[in-house]
Image (cartoon, rainbow, N blue to C red):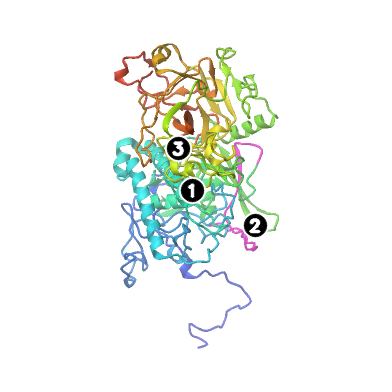
Amino acid sequence: MENGVGSNAGIDKSKVLEVKPLRCLVPVFPNPPGMSSVTTPHPTPFVCVSPAGPFPAGVQPFYPFLAKNDAPQAAPAPQAGNFGFGSSIPAPVPLNSFRTPTPKSNGRGRPRKYNKSSGLGSAAGGEDDGFSESQSGFHPDDGDTSGKRRGRPKKTGRREASGEENHEDVVHETVVNAILTSFKLHGIEELRRNIGDVETSTVVLRAFDALRRRLTQLDELKDTAPGTAKRPDLKAANLLMTKGIRANAMKRIGHVPGIEIGDIFFFRMELCIVGLHAPSMAGIDYMSVKVTMDEEPLAVSIVSSGGYDDNGDDSDILIYSGQGGVQRRDGQMFDQKLERGNLALEKSLHRGNDVRVVRGIKDLAHGTGKIYVYDGLYKIQESWIEKNKSGCTVFKYKLVRIPGQPEAFSLWKSIQQWKDGTTARAGIIIPDLTSGAESLPVALVNDVDNEKGPAHFTYVRHLRYLQPFSVPDASVGCHCLNGCQAGDTHCPCNQKNDGFLPYSSIGVLLSSKSVIHECAQSCSCPITCRNRISQVGIRLRLEVFKTKSRGWGLRSWDPIRAGGFICEYAGDIIKPTDAGFANESDEYIFDSTRNFEPIEPVQDSNGAEKSPFPLIISAKDNGNVSRFMNHSCSPNVYWQPVLRQSNNDVFLHIAFFAIQHIPPMQELVYDYGIVPPEKGRKAKKKCLCGSSKCRGFFH
């Protein structure tokens, strides 16, 4: 066969060809007809769903996912024009544009391996950002704060019964359905039409966080092998995505509705479900646009998460390294190529389109995770090729922040300088308002006018009780010498909290309860116990500052996680008989008997009321930082009753937690509530919260 097709004549066998097997290729579909040019790009949909569906309008399944999982069928014969993928597919982008576990797990909460032949793990417009974890579903920059080994979980060494796996699936399905119901997300398209994309983003993020925290509680009850990575964030995202729950389903150039510059995220999956950055692993996200008769990729967003040396002293300039295998964990080094994400950045340089930038910052409070900060829009100014320290060729891109945008990443750098003492905080009146009462100083700041501070009061850390409430049933304290442990069925404190510890290992409130039962004086556990979070005082760098129109307010130098403890309401308890006069004359009042709009339905087995005792607190003469929190009809903080019972004595406290992730220097506000009609008419004050949901007044 010297002259045949299979002849070896003329082939240079000394050359090494780079060949990828067909099963590793990901199908790429063209943009739909009518896609405009880059000068006026329309949003293009991206799909972050299970390969088995459900699929949004305009997107169809492709082989081998044409048939249901339980009804295998033969592959259809390839037809002209469809390249063997079944019927013609009008979808504009690859399916499954984020890496996340498949809908079914192995029963231990561990994601199964990814199958490259199915296209799973293929990011929309990119690879794995230089980390060879395409089969694990884990990313080194995800917001995991467990401190455990990242990457693919170790095998437990025992086989799970199918009954246990099915039971876990049923439990997860029950939990996610309950949360979707509470957030009214079963009909997300109708919800989007009713409240718009901006509010939908907020609702989806809160639902994700509520589900993730609930799964964290459930994961703690399972007996997993040491070193196994628990990733409730991936589970939560997978459960939501498979049901089509996400915001901003259309890829777009520019800002994303509902996401403000400076917003923070503690998990990469949060970026995915709100459409800020579609791939969960790739650092470059891009879309295809039609220019004349051809299509070309344009970058829409990048995540600078520290995988490469993307640094610099100027906060408005980012030197970004391209994608490629220069940091493979198996030790191999390769040159980067001008393809996929790198090509998209190069095209965006010449087209001049805006690119969203998300900065990854190390979570100093917990060590192992990252905080992702949306830093706004940038333009790519130039690109070049250089050799790195290992001698590999890498692409470099210089991005410059568009002027006139609010502070974001630069603010973080300024705050760190305040903490280090290298730069003085402008407008400081008193470095520590607490005079050492708190473990961390609370600055008093005024950079608005010449007022020197609020009226005199005595700073106290806790609520001042004259006498506790009494109950007929005595409480038995726990004997957890090393602190209460999750899953300990013998711990009476766990039993009071429906069998769960209410807080995570890093002090985040895991579920909404009518009442939290914390350990008290009769318990043997130390002050460091996980069930004493509200008793240890403030752990944030807070400042009391002068607002422009609402007097003094409160904000934090530190980022606050959703569910994170902020402070308790300290002051003097007022008798209900004296409350009428106090409500009229006291501006620093907390009244638990008012009507409050719930953040989400409580998850109690007993269905108790939110506050078991009428508690009215005055912080006029004695109080802490909580007295400076202003009212808002769209709050980012909510209050939670906390009971500490010793024998027959009950001490009720009011603890404040974050509703959502709160960036540094964002004012902390909560809803003061509405006085019930049966209590008579109270004087109304004009509300200046500026929220789109403002009621116009508060009591």
Instruction: Provide the residue designation for mark 3.
Output: 259
Few, some or many residues within 10 Å of mark 3 (<14, 14–19, 20+): many
Quick one: label 2 or label 3, which is nearer the N terminus?
3
State the image quarter where residue 580 is shown: top left
Q: Position of residue 66 (x, y in %)?
A: 33, 64
Instruction: Provide the residue designation for mark 1.
Output: 490
Q: Nearer the viewer, mark 3 or mark 1?
A: 1
Q: Position of residue 124 (x, y in %)?
A: 46, 54
Any magenta on residue 461? Answer: no
Any magenta on residue 337? Answer: yes
User: The residue under label 3 is which amino acid type?
Assistant: Ile
Residue projecting furthest to the bottom: 1
Few, some or many residues within 10 Å of mark 2 (<14, 14–19, 20+): some
Quick one: label 2 or label 1, which is nearer the N terminus?
2
SS label for mark 2: strand
Q: Magenta segment, which residues?
A: 312-339
SS label for mark 1: loop
Q: Position of residue 647 (x, y in %)?
A: 48, 34
Task: In the rendered view, tell whether residue 127 sits above or below residue 450.
Answer: below
SS label for mark 3: loop
Q: Main secondary structure of the magenta part?
A: loop
In the image, 523 versus 202, the foreground residue is: 523
- Check contact, mark 2 vs mark 3: CB within 8 A: no
Query: Residue 393: which disc?
Result: 2
User: The residue under label 1 is which amino acid type?
Assistant: His
